[in-house]
Image (cartoon, rainbow, N blue to C red):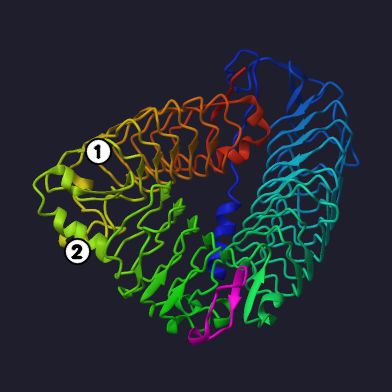
Amino acid sequence: MKKLIAFCLCICMAVCCFTACDDNNGPSETTSSKNQTSLPEKNYLINEEGILLSCIGQADENGVYVIPENVTMIGESAFAGDATLKEVVIGSNVKTIGSGAFQYCPSLKKVTVSEGVETIGSHAFSYCENLKEISLPSTVKSLGESAFCYCTALEEISLEHIRRVGEAAFINCSSLERVTFSSELEKIESWAFSQCSSLENISFEGVTELREIGDYVFTGCSMLRSVEIPEGVSRIGIYAFYDCARLSSISIPSSVEVVDFGALNYTRWYQEKDDAYLIVGDGVLIKTTVHPSLLDLSGKGIKTIGATAFYNAAMNNEAPEYGYKYASLLQTITIPEGVREIGKSAFAGCFALENVVLNKELIRIDQHAFDILTDGVTTKAKVNLENCENLEYIGAYAFQGCSGIENIQLPESIKSVGEYAFVSTNAHTNFMEQAAKAEKEEDRYLISSGVLLAVYVAEGQEAIHVPEGVRVIAGAVFCGWDNPYIPEDLKELSPAGMTKYNITYHVKELYLPEGLELIESMAFFRMDCVEKVTIPSTVQVIGSNAFGLCSKLSEILGGENLEEIRDAAFSYATSLKEFKMPNNVKTVGNSLFEGCSSLKTVYFSENLLDFGASMFDSSCTSLSQVYFNPAVRPYVYFVLGSLTHEVHVNYYK
């Protein structure tokens, strides 16, 4: 698990290397030759809008540089890599410090930021390894992603006016000892203070607006000893305090509804707790030491079975105390009335499970919740979902390997089902075997309460018509094959476990019905032969990797009411050359076009402000033009990712 954390750290730290400027006419093309005023007596460039485009080697004999008064924005990479710069003074006329403005300035020690500066963009001071002193004015309300990452000399910073701390903003600031948060703090995004190995003191005093401690926020803060999470926080994210080895005191308020996977693992506090039922926050069971023969969850006010509460830690060679030490003996579990959520991997690896009784109040069963399948081992666990009349969400792999499930009857309340949620259950296996004998195409679809759960594609079938009435395509329903390689003998693939392999090699046409609302993760992953997809107007969400590795997909149409596109949705669609995002899209995830080597132009939604990280990567070698809302400019490095060639960035007016 620690190796996984290290790997994620490397991915999180990818930085891009290109130049982006602005223009008056727009959408505006970002070339270094338009609308600029060159001042030959000083080797810097300022365009007509007051954007300082380039300013390398202009510090005085003491290494000090004062930003000119006519500058309103310090542009992307304006000072990047300047080894002569030791101190910079930023006046009140500057409103924005752009993406990567001072990144990799190895001698920069002091930055004075005047009142009036409003935005510090992504990677603005990243890898300024000698930066020790910077004060943030009250006018700065948010810090961009990776703004101070790897500023290894920074010891203290006051965030008393900051409402949003961006993703990885202070990651690996190894000398940072103290952080004071604003009472107005609203958001700390994932990885924000991860690996700040000297961080001893964090103060949330007076904070009332914070609702979530993001994923990995304090991972590896090995000197952190005490934390008081403020009232109002409802979620503590994945690995939020993982490996904070000295953390012995943590106050969890009554507002907390979710303590996510591994959030407190490898902390002294968690290790020392030996309560029969460790219940925190608003009824979150995160640990139990009770033997299965005496186990009784009723009457204890439990509202959430926390991630890993009954997890078999031995599956991943984890110490028993980071799961349920009796997991391999648990045969029956009754989820009592009042429980609304079963967290990630809550019962994963409970191989002896035979009977699971769920309650009618349950709303969410998270990914891997009852995942049993390991090295081909399954369990006889029987689960009946029919009475879960309020159930809305079933996560990826939730019941994988629960072979005792003979029938999948979802309630009408269901809204989402993740990939492979019912793989290696008898219900799924039996359907595939019967569908293989069916003569009519409509008998080859497993549908429950409007959710398409499985499909059998006949040998040689070249077109798929998803039936009318389907409102959700569950995860991985049409996934091309279940192995990361193509074996010479196609019989090696397992159609009983996954969708039939031959959709990868034959299906060329895909028809989706109006009324479809959600395309879940990996829904059409590796459909190699499909060239064009029309998204129905009713679709609101496209899930992560939904069209990933669709190598011949060259045209994506429709989707005019699409609101969200999740991580890597079109990754490695290597034939895609242009993408025009519908203007209703408000949110996109990470790595959207990773590996799209033929992609030349992308028009992002004019209304899009909520971006994930690294839309592109170094394999997007054909990319030449992208179009953004101008508000994205301060964060453009974070958004565009690890491109290694010049890309023209254009901003809509």
**Would you say 503 lies left or right of 544 here?**
left
Residue in the foreground of this view, choosing between 246 and 212: 212
Residue 474 shown in magenta: no
**Would you say 226 lies left or right of 352 here?**
right
**Would you say 429 lies left or right of 220 here?**
left
Residues at marks 1 and 2, CA–CA distance in whole angstroms: 30 Å
Q: Which residue is mark 1?
A: 467
Above or below 83: residue 28:
above
Determine the secondary structure under disc 1.
loop
Determine the secondary structure under disc 2.
helix
Q: Residue at x 36, y 64 (%)?
A: 384
Q: Amino acid at mark 1?
A: Pro
Residue 235: quarter of image: bottom right
Report crowding for label 1: few under 14, some 14 to 19, many 20 or more residues within 10 A (C-alpha): some
Residue in the foreground of this view, choosing between 609 and 343: 343
**Would you say 174 lies left or right of 299 here?**
right
Report crowding for label 2: few under 14, some 14 to 19, many 20 or more residues within 10 A (C-alpha): few
Q: Nearer the observer, disc 1 or disc 2?
A: 1
**Residue extent of the magenta highlight:** 285-301
Q: Residue at x 53, y 60 (%)?
A: 341
Residue 298 shown in magenta: yes
Which residue is at the far top? 25
Q: Which residue is mark 2?
A: 492
Q: Is residue 489 visible?
A: no
Q: Is residue 435 visible?
A: yes
Q: Amino acid at mark 2?
A: Glu
Residue 587 lies, in percent from the top left, at 55, 36
Residue 627 lies, in percent from the top left, at 54, 25
Residue in the foreground of this view, choosing between 468 and 307: 468
Q: Quadrant of the C terminus?
A: top right
